[in-house]
């Protein structure tokens, strides 16, 4: 091994030891340093040594925390691990945040990191994805043991557009028709987001990429695509009106954010436009972000409680998106 590499690795090891006291307050510190070093020394003998130093780097996910890819609920979260603004166990970390915007606007934010892409899940009220049965998001969140949940795209509201819709939930296919008008969000088996502007390319995604579609949504519009704002001002439902909105975004591998643009208590006509929501999602660091059903459908649920103000009654809808723990109750005390 080259002397320079030996010196560099020695310095790195020393830095890792010195950094240990800070990892509780800065848990991503060692992870960031690890990936930076692997990129720098990504070759030959040096790479092999780094893989020994950092074996987690070889894994795409922690398969020990995989959940079934079906409509079953996640594991029951440990009540003792919930705090006022977060939840964390060996398989999931959720951090809740509230920010104030202009004119009394409130942003409700949930930052989520998971160990397995199977912990990013969708649920629906009926017996299968072809059902149009509806329920409150807060009720469905409890049914599916969600640590944190947000409303889905309410696919039953598509009406005639349902004939040309692209709807898949946990691998269960309702329809895979595109109409050339709606933006589509596809989530693959790795938990990665793929947005398709005006549906272009969505119908050939699996054939073109070799990936599997686990979930697909056709509400939209896409807010951020490949890191850039992608909203079309003429697309969607009242795109230029100030309304309560809901969105989901991917930040990085197995790292996501859920957002509600919340109106002040008692207000029913305040919120953000699609463009303003897209700008906010980009500011949060999303590389892909997607608009979900809004208005009274916009609901963020954490630990069984609705986090955002509801000017009107919470709306019954067909589906939700949620994140689940993969730690079994039998393992709570281990």
Image (cartoon, rainbow, N blue to C red):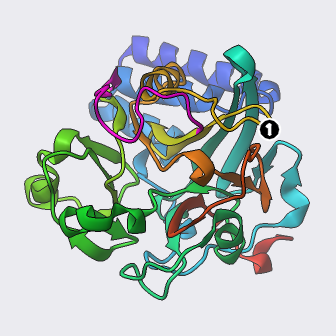
Given residues 130 and 303, the one toward you in this image is: 130
- Helix, strand or loop under label 1: loop
Quadrant of res 136: bottom right
Q: Which residue in the rendered view is the most extreme toward the bottom?
A: 127
Residue that appears at 74% across and 56% down: 89
Q: Is residue 295 left or right of residue 19?
A: left
Given residues 91 and 290, the one toward you in this image is: 290
Where residue 134 appears, as percent x and y from the top left, is 55, 75
Q: Is residue 275 positioned above or below 65 on the image?
A: above
Residue that appears at 74% across and 33% down: 97
Residue that appears at 34% across and 37% down: 222
Residue at the disc numbered 1 = 266
Where residue 205 appears, as percent x and y from the top left, is 15, 55
Q: Is residue 83 visible?
A: yes
Q: Is residue 21 positioned above or below 148 on the image?
A: above
First to last magenta residue range: 227-244
Q: Is residue 176 left or right of residue 71?
A: left
Q: Is residue 1 visible?
A: no
Asked whether residue 237 is drawn in magenta, I would say: yes
Crowding at mark 1 (Cα within 10 Å: few <14, some 14-19, many 20+): few
Quadrant of res 155: bottom left
Given residues 66 and 215, the one toward you in this image is: 215
Asked whether residue 62 is drawn in magenta, I would say: no
Q: Is residue 298 positioned above or below 319 on the image?
A: above
């Amino acid at each position: 091994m080259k002397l320079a590499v030996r010196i560099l690795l020695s310095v790195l090891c020393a830095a890792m030891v010195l950094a240990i006291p800070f990892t509780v307050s800065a848990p991503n510190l060692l992870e960031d340093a690890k990936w930076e070093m692997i990129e720098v020394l990504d070759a030959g003998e040096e790479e092999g040594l780094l893989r020994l130093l950092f074996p987690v780097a070889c894994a795409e996910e922690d398969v020990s925390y995989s959940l079934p890819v079906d409509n079953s609920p996640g594991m029951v979260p440990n009540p003792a691990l919930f705090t006022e603004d977060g939840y964390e166990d060996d398989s999931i970390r959720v951090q809740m945040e509230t920010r104030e915007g202009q004119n009394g606007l409130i942003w409700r934010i949930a930052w989520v990191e998971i160990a397995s892409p199977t912990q990013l899940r969708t649920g629906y009220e009926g017996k299968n994805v072809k059902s149009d049965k509806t329920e409150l998001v807060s009720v469905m969140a409890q049914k599916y043991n969600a640590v944190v949940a947000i409303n889905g795209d309410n696919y039953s509201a598509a009406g005639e557009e349902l004939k040309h819709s692209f709807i898949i939930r946990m691998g269960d296919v309702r329809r895979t028709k595109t109409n050339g008008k709606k933006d589509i969000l596809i989530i693959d088996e790795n938990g990665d987001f793929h947005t398709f502007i005006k549906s272009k390319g969505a119908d050939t995604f699996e054939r073109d990429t070799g990936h599997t579609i686990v979930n697909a949504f056709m509400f939209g519009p896409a807010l951020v695509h490949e890191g850039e704002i992608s909203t079309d001002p003429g697309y969607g439902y009242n795109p230029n009106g100030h309304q309560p909105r809901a969105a989901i975004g991917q930040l990085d591998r197995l790292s996501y954010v859920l957002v509600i643009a919340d109106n002040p208590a008692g207000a029913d006509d305040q919120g953000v436009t699609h463009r303003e929501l897209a700008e906010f999602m980009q500011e949060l660091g999303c590389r892909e972000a997607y608009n979900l059903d809004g208005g009274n459908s916009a609901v963020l649920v954490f630990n069984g409680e609705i986090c955002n103000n509801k000017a009107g009654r919470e709306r019954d809808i067909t589906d939700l998106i949620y994140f689940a723990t993969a730690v079994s109750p039998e393992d709570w005390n281990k």
